[in-house]
Image (spheres, helix red, strand yellow):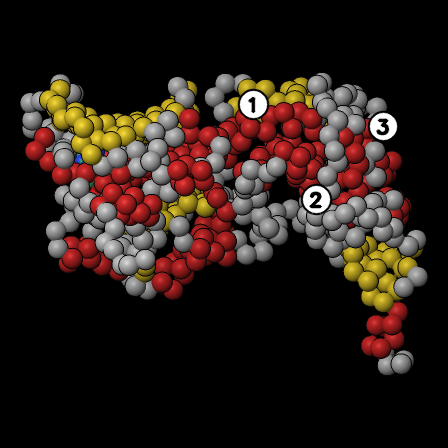
């Protein structure tokens, strides 16, 4: 093909792709414009995960009628004139690309009135073309409606996820901006239902209550800031979670640099570093951090979505984040009890512990056995299992426990170190998957229903997983807002902190990218077993270890946990002989 200059229309669509990746990107740009316009409230309305409609209304300065069409031109902005302005930019926008990009791939209606003007304007733009421009009455501020996103970009449309997934991205985004701007009132309406609201009181703590729920917010630790800037002009304020309230993924670490939400692996890592040795493996804290530094120490013009920044002194920012989080943690976190018995076991004697270990906890008198109504038989699908192979273990003789974490056992080939948590996960998992398939998961009905406060995201997550959760033995019903009532749980979770278990299962599911229908039950079972299994750090008696090893010997795939990690390592006779120079 000869070289040709692309038509304006094609070029516009390609450029739009950099800014508008999914509905949440549209929400982000429109919300940033509202904030830049000095709004005190921002109302966001979303239909069908944003693919049908995204509407953002603000009470900001509005756009003068003479400029409304210009606002949709590429590289048209009121926020920047010269390239020098970039070094001290105080607004979220500056590239003049968002409205042009959005209008290239959707149907946009703009309704606006500038504060000092009599009449407002309504402008309709369809795929970059202005199709209507009229005077209308309007109370002031700006409302932009974006309909039929990607109607003319089939490739993008194909990549959109389920409505629920797109909605989740939007939920998170809106909560983040609400946290970054606590003095603004945000509200989010999903398919006609008010999903989120922030009071606009100016207090970040008030927003945290809305985002994470009262309990989680109360447990968070405020950083010493917003005190003075350090010698480099870096100032950090915000909240971090106590080490006891951790999550399955890093999604709940939100970072804002000069009021801009940024995604930065390095800084996220700095936050995690502050928790060094305080969190269990593979668990992550919650954190909301505002980082302020002189605008000239920052380059915000890194990417069209503006969600990355470059720091002049990256290491200094990194250290400041780590230090302030660590100081807050050390100053305020309660010292964990040396011998924490809060985990899986709460008394109950050897008999019940033995039952727990072999996954037969249902025999206890206090438990009512039930079958989740409507449960259907599904194919057991073993996580991480290739073709189902039976690879039985040789008989093992338990010798003892190492570091309250590993079981030492002897077998015909040598010495085995068995990870007690991974092994127990495997045992519970196989039992659970087969009882899911037979729809006879042992269920613990709670004597008193438990109310659990969820976050908006977790509520969304619960909505999409209700049926499989039910098959697993969770009976959960809405209790107004983001609070739910738990009536029953799978028996394997009966002795854990049920709130924490439900919340972390939901968080873990949130990290999944839409699993196939036939994986769902297995995924859930694996998530539940992770919570229900005996932890590292728990002392086990010889009988308990023997029971666990016997149950493991009976498993179909005893050598890996449901997540694919090994349950045991073998120190073979041959290896020992070599090491001791016997050969
Ligand atoms: P940028 O935000 O980078 O300037 P945009 O394409 O997002 O570029 O917006 C173009 C211009 O339209 C802005 O510079 C601003 O002047 C105007 N504008 C957009 N949204 C609003 C709004 N909600 N209120 C007032 N003015 C707005
Ligand atoms: Mg903008």
Residue 310: image quadrant is bottom left
Q: Earlier in the sequence, mark 1 or mark 3?
A: 3
- What is the secondary structure assignment of the residue under circle 1? strand
Residue ID at (79%, 34%): 434
Residue 289 percent across, percent down from the top left: 39, 47
Where the C terminus falls, by quadrant?
bottom right
Residue 216 percent across, percent down from the top left: 50, 35
Residue 528: image quadrant is top right
Q: Earlier in the sequence, mark 1 or mark 2?
A: 2
Residue bearing the label numbered 1: 484
Which labelled disc corresponds to residue 383?
A: 2
Front-lying residue, 180 or 157: 157
Residue bearing the label numbered 3: 363
Note whether residue 60 is visible.
no
Relative horizontal placement of residue 438, taking residue 16 as reference (left or right): right
Residue 355 percent across, percent down from the top left: 84, 36
- What is the secondary structure assignment of the residue under circle 3? helix
Asked if disc 1 and disc 2 are in contact, CB closer than 8 Å, the reply is no
Q: CA distance from mark 1 to mark 3?
A: 28 Å
Residue 244 percent across, percent down from the top left: 57, 43
Asked if disc 1 and disc 3 are in contact, CB closer than 8 Å, the reply is no
């Amino acid at each position: 093909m000869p070289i040709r200059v692309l038509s304006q229309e094609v070029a516009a669509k390609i450029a739009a792709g950099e800014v508008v990746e999914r509905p949440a990107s549209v929400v982000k740009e429109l919300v940033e414009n509202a904030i830049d316009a000095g709004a005190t409230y921002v109302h966001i309305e979303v239909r069908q995960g944003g693919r049908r409609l995204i509407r953002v209304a603000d009470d900001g300065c509005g756009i003068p009628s003479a400029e409304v069409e210009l606002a949709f031109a590429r590289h048209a902005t009121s926020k920047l004139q010269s390239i020098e302005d970039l070094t001290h930019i105080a607004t979220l926008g500056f590239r003049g690309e968002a409205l042009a990009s959005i209008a290239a791939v959707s149907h946009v209606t703009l309704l606006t009135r500038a504060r000092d003007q009599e009449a407002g304007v309504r402008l309709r733009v369809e795929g970059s073309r202005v199709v209507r421009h009229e005077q209308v009455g309007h109370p002031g501020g700006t409302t932009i409606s974006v309909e039929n996103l990607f109607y003319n970009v089939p490739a993008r449309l194909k990549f959109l996820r389920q409505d629920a997934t797109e909605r989740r991205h939007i939920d998170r985004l809106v909560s983040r901006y609400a946290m970054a701007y606590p003095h603004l009132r945000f509200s989010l309406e999903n398919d006609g239902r008010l999903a989120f609201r922030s009071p606009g009181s100016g207090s970040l703590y008030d927003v945290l209550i809305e985002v994470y729920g009262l309990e989680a917010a109360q447990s968070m630790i405020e950083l010493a800031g917003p005190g003075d800037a350090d010698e480099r002009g870096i100032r950090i304020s915000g909240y971090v979670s106590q080490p006891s309230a951790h999550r399955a993924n890093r999604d709940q670490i939100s970072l804002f640099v000069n009021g801009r939400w940024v995604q930065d692996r390095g800084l996220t890592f700095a936050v995690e570093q502050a928790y060094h040795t305080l969190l269990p493996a593979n668990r992550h804290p919650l954190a909301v951090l505002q980082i302020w530094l002189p605008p000239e120490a920052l380059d915000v013009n890194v990417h069209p979505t503006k969600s990355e920044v470059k720091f002049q002194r990256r290491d200094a920012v990194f250290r400041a984040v780590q230090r302030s989080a660590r100081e807050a943690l050390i100053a305020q976190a309660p010292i964990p009890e040396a011998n924490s018995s809060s985990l899986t076991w709460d008394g109950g004697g050897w008999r019940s512990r033995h039952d727990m270990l072999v996954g037969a906890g249902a025999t206890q008198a206090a438990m009512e056995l039930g079958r989740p109504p409507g449960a259907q038989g599904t194919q057991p699908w073993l996580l991480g299992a290739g073709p189902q192979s039976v690879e039985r273990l040789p008989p093992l003789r338990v010798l003892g426990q190492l570091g309250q974490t590993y079981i030492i056992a002897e077998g015909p080939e040598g010495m085995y170190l068995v990870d007690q948590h991974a092994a127990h996960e495997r045992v519970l998992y196989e039992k659970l998957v087969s009882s899911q398939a037979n729809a006879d998961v042992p269920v613990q009905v709670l004597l008193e229903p438990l109310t659990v406060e969820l976050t908006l995201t977790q509520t969304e997550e619960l909505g999409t997983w209700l049926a499989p959760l039910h098959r697993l033995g969770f009976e959960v019903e809405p209790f107004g807002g983001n609070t739910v009532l738990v009536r029953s749980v799978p028996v394997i979770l009966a002795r854990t902190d049920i709130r924490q278990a439900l919340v972390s299962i939901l968080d873990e599911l949130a990290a999944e990218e839409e699993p196939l229908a036939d994986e769902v039950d297995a995924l859930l079972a694996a998530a539940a077993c992770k919570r229900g299994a005996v932890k590292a750090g728990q002392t086990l008696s010889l009988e308990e270890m023997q029971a666990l090893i016997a149950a493991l010997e009976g498993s179909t795939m005893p050598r890996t946990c449901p997540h694919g990690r090994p349950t045991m390592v073998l120190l073979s006779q041959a290896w020992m002989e070599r090491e001791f120079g016997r050969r």
